[in-house]
């Protein structure tokens, strides 16, 4: 080695096994207690979910591996993974799972846990902020287009205040407020 | 109970046939009811059989009847004094009480008298309404299919050398008394039409294992030639996929038990008998129970490619055949294949109307198959009072197991009469 | 006359008023009453479910409760709204504890959700309640069998136990206009819209693969029933030209636009000029 970082330690040669005592054995139960999590343990590692997933070929952790990691208790790795946020929520994995593990829904649960711990991509945080500020995702700007089509310039019946009130007091408020 | 009380056997597959012959040979009057035109059931379409790799037309069950050379299909089923065979027949109602059942049979029209037909083939030449279901069919006779009738059928009636054909035949109802009933209604190979990822029925080169067995059979439509159903092109690569519809909570939760073995049986046949054809098997577990592990080892040695994982997509390849993408879970990579034949090892499901049958007989089912009265007793073939079941009516099973159960049924009935 | 609570969401009115206009006109011509829901807000989209499950439950429960009041079904033209409302309802029906908690919250708005309301995609409602035969009767200029590929959208189709949808519904509705349904291998694949915020390159790639599969299958147009899918498949074609150097020229139309044209309405009425990839070639396929 030509460069050192100052600390003189022997180079890593053999990779240490994952020390099971360092994992969070309660993670499995935590997910199982969340919406759609109850069938988690039914997974028999067939990898159909991964075969079904249109984007897992570019993931370090494939869907079946995420499920495996949850079962083993690799809580930090799962909640800090980019995979859970890239998931398209297309439900293809879930649809084909022969054991009715609600894979996509479980990934939703993971995102909620990650968000609670502040592990949330900037783009999603921005989205949360916009929702809170505007009370909706998209605001009508080109009302003349609507009028050309015989539509009311504003959306009939729309009311955004309640939406903001609700989300201010739930996790959205915490995510945005706690920056 | 007297020896001359009749036993009714429903289903003329391997199991029902064995039970019928065993009982008839022991002097018990037996009525064998089969809804098809020929007995034999699924075994008719299997070509070679594990565990012996024998031709399926002859099997072990008739070992003790040397006169018929181990073969049911050339056996004198029709001539047996104690055996009444009713093909094209179903059970309509069951009344009476255990030990004294009163059973209504609906006997379909017998257009061709099997005692007369000599299978000369003359009628078949005249009209496609006359078909020979299998050279091994039993009774040995052609079958008339009214839907296919054309102008020539009349001529066939006249020209038939034995005057075996009667187009005016009508269905008849028959009521019989039986002391015991044996359910041997067998299984059905699941057709995976709803499983979108496999495109069964949409892509002609996607077939089931039974369909593959037909292709391998020298007596099948392709005379044993492996060709792509889509365009008749040569088959260079066969891919099989295991556990289709089995071990799947959306279809059948159970393991169908023998599909790993018969897939490997087919893989071996292809690897050894068809030169230059590559076989791949996509699996999640290979379950070649007890002695059948030898098929697994044999096929690995024969060069069969085993891929642990699942199929992502199947689509038509540009130059004919199929393009299949498989996720290989051991390698953690997606693999792309060009295959000519994509074979689904689908679940063995209860045969059609088995629920109605169970209801009629007042017996329990489990996953749709007939359930033993007391699964812990070791008498798995007893399913009700004077009601027995054997073979795949009880759940997925191989032939030897079906035969063993059929014999157990015969024994139980005989013991009951001592 | 079938009457519904119309939940328009925020994407359709802001981004695709042409979809909205065509829908209203088709409904009127089919004698269907669509009433905009009063006092409702955004569904938050499945994105909200990802980071704030409970907040997502409450905002959607509020909309559901409003819809429940008059006994009519809620219909929506947006898959995101459909998924949010339907999914939230599914979850609340399956979780009594959450239902109770959410109802505590709804008291603040003088609302109560019992869970009896139905949520449906508006196209399914037309299919089931008006029927393909009645729709076909109103078609005066059927399309000449032109090949159209359907992109249904993930959140409309899956999970099936939640959405209760089937692709045949969309296929039959499209055939009723005289068009031919073009099957293509990647019909189930996601358009990529959901992943845009976190991985744009991936989103573009997904749209591109999908478009390619459609083009290879020989389709001339794409039918969608969701503003997000429509946006992604339509708009990305310009991005794909830049990134992949591939031009697909596949106009993307919302189902009510196709139906309206086949029913004799003109292109201005359905805002055809607002479709990004020029969609007027469809006019050449109308038989007079
Ligand atoms: C692809 C494949 C390959 C196989 N290969 C082998 C092998 O190599 N070796 C081996 O040992 N096993 C093999 N098997 C299994 C074998 O097919 C079965 O073990 C055997 O055929 C079971 O016989 P059975 O009599 O129980 O049922 P079946 O063969 O299903 O017979 C049931 C009969 O009952 C009739 N029937 C059903 N319902 C009624 C009714 N209501 N009224 C009247 N009649 C009725 C049916 O028409 C049928 O004739 C294979 C199976 C498959 C799918
Ligand atoms: S498909 Fe289901 S059972 Fe199979 S690995 Fe994925 S989660 Fe597990
Ligand atoms: S829902 Fe997510 S993990 Fe599942 S198949 Fe789609 S992208 Fe993959
Ligand atoms: S002509 Fe008569 S004897 Fe010959 S096959 Fe036909 S039915 Fe049988
Ligand atoms: S026998 Fe093999 S293929 Fe059949 S269900 Fe069991 S594991 Fe799957």
Image: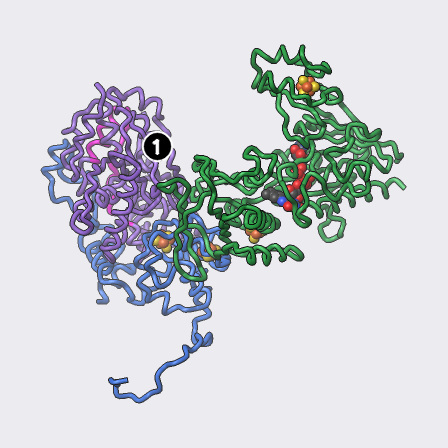
B210 or C131, nearer to the observer: B210
Query: In the current view of this chain or complex, which residue is farthest to the left?
Result: A144
In the displayed structure image, the side of residue C165 where residue C248 appears, left or right: left
Chain identifier of the green chain:
B
Which range of residues does the magenta coloring cover?
C19-45
Q: Chain of mark 1?
A: C
Residue at (81%, 39%) from the top-left corner? B65
Residue at (56%, 58%) from the top-left corner? B301
Q: Is residue C31 inside the magenta stretch?
A: yes
Q: Secondary structure at mark 1?
A: helix
Chain C rendering hue: purple
Residue at (21%, 48%) from the top-left corner? A160
Q: Is residue B92 inside the magenta stretch?
A: no
Viewport quadrant of the C terminus of chain C: top left
Viewport quadrant of the N terminus of chain C: top left
Q: How is the image coloured?
A: by chain
Q: Quadrant of residue B331?
A: bottom left
In the displayed structure image, the side of residue A79 where residue B163 appears, left or right: right
C167 or A145, nearer to the observer: C167
Q: Position of residue B317 (x, y in %)?
A: 37, 42
A148 or C119, nearer to the observer: A148
Residue linked to disc 1: C171
Chain identifier of the blue chain:
A
Query: In the current view of this chain or complex, which residue is farthest to the front?
Result: B275
Q: Number of numbered discs present?
A: 1
- The answer to whether mark 1 is within 8 Å of ligand 3 is no
Q: Is residue A106 visible?
A: yes
Q: Quadrant of residue B298?
A: bottom right
Q: Position of residue B99 (x, y in %)?
A: 82, 35
Q: Position of residue B122 (x, y in %)?
A: 65, 18
In the displayed structure image, the side of residue B179 where residue A108 appears, left or right: left
Q: Position of residue B94 (x, y in %)?
A: 73, 30
């Amino acid at each position: 080695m030509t460069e050192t970082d100052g600390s003189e330690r022997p180079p890593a040669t053999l990779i240490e096994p994952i020390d099971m005592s360092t994992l969070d054995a309660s993670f499995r139960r935590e997910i199982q207690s969340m919406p759609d999590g109850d069938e988690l343990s039914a997974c028999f590692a067939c990898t159909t979910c991964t075969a079904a997933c249109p984007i897992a070929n570019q993931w370090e952790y494939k869907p079946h591996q995420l499920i495996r990691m949850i079962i083993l208790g690799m809580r930090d790795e799962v909640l800090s993974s980019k995979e859970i946020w890239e998931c398209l929520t297309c439900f293809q994995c879930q649809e084909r799972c022969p054991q009715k593990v609600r894979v996509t829904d479980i990934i939703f649960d993971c995102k909620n846990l990650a968000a609670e711990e502040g592990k949330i991509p900037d783009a999603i945080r921005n989205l949360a902020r916009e929702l809170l500020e505007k009370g909706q995702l998209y605001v009508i700007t080109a009302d003349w287009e609507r009028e050309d089509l015989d539509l009311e310039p504003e959306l009939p019946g729309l009311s955004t205040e309640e939406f903001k009130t609700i989300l201010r007091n739930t996790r959205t408020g915490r995510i945005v407020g706690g920056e | 109970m007297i020896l001359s009380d009749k036993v009714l056997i429903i289903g003329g597959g391997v199991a029902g046939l064995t039970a019928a012959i065993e009982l008839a040979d022991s002097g018990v009057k037996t009525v064998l009811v089969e809804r098809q035109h020929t007995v034999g059931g699924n075994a008719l379409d299997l070509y070679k059989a594990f565990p012996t790799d024998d031709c399926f037309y002859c099997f072990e069950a008739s070992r003790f009847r040397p006169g018929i050379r181990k073969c049911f299909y050339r056996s004198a089923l029709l001539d047996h004094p104690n055996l009444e065979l009713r093909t094209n027949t179903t059970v309509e109602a069951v009344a009476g009480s255990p030990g004294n059942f009163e059973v209504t049979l609906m006997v379909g029209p017998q257009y061709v008298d099997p005692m007369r037909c000599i299978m000369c083939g003359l009628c078949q030449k005249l009209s496609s309404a006359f078909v020979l279901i299998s050279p091994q069919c039993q009774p040995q006779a052609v079958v008339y299919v009214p839907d296919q009738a054309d102008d020539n059928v009349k001529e066939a009636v006249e020209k038939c050398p034995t005057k075996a054909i009667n187009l005016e035949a009508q269905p008849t109802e028959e009521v019989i008394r039986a002391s015991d009933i044996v359910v041997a209604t067998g299984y059905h190979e699941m057709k995976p039409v709803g499983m979108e990822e496999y495109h069964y029925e949409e892509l002609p080169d996607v077939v089931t294992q039974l369909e593959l067995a037909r292709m391998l059979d020298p007596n099948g439509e392709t005379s044993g030639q492996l060709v792509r159903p889509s365009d008749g092109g040569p088959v260079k690569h066969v891919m099989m996929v295991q556990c289709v519809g089995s071990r799947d909570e959306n279809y059948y939760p159970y393991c169908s038990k023998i599909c790993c073995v018969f897939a490997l049986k087919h893989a071996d046949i292809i690897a050894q008998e068809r030169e230059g054809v590559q076989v791949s098997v996509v699996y999640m577990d290979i379950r070649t129970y007890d002695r059948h592990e030898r098929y697994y080892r044999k096929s690995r040695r024969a060069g069969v490619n085993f891929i642990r994982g699942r199929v992502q997509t199947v689509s038509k390849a540009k130059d004919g055949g199929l393009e299949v993408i498989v996720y290989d879970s051991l390698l953690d990579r997606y693999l792309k294949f060009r295959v000519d034949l994509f074979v689904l090892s689908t679940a063995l499901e209860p045969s059609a109307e088995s629920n109605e049958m169970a209801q009629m007989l007042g017996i329990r089912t489990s996953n749709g198959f007939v359930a033993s009265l007391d699964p812990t007793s070791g008498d798995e073939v007893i399913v009700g009072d004077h009601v027995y079941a054997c073979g795949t009516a009880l759940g997925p099973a191989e032939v030897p197991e079906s035969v063993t159960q059929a014999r157990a049924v015969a024994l139980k009935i005989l013991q009951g009469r001592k | 006359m079938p009457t519904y609570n119309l939940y328009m969401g925020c994407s359709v009115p802001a981004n695709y008023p042409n979809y909205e206009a065509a829908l209203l006109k088709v409904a009127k011509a089919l004698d269907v009453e669509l009433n905009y829901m009063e006092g409702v807000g955004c569904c938050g989209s499945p994105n909200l479910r990802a980071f704030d499950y409970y907040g997502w439950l409450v905002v959607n429960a509020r909309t559901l409760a409003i819809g429940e009041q008059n006994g009519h079904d809620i219909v929506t033209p947006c898959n995101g709204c459909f998924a949010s409302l339907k999914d939230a309802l599914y979850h609340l029906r399956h979780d009594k504890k959450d239902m109770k908690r959410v109802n505590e919250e709804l008291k603040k708005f003088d609302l109560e959700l019992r869970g009896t309301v139905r949520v449906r995609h508006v196209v399914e409602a037309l299919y089931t309640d008006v029927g393909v035969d009645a729709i076909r009767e109103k078609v005066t200029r059927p399309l000449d069998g032109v090949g159209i590929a359907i992109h249904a959208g993930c959140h409309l189709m899956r999970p099936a136990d939640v959405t209760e949808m089937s692709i045949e519904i969309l296929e039959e509705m499209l055939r009723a206009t005289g068009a031919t349904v073009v099957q293509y291998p990647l019909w189930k694949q996601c358009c990529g819209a959901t992943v845009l915020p976190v991985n744009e390159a991936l989103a573009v790639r997904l749209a591109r693969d999908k478009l390619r599969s459609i083009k290879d299958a020989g389709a001339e147009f794409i039918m969608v029933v969701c503003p997000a899918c429509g946006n992604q498949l339509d708009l990305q074609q310009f991005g794909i030209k830049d990134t992949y150097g591939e031009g697909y020229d596949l106009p993307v139309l919302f189902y009510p636009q196709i139906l309206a044209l086949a029913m004799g309405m003109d292109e201005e009425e359905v805002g055809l000029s607002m479709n990004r990839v020029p969609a007027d070639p469809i006019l050449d396929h109308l038989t007079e």
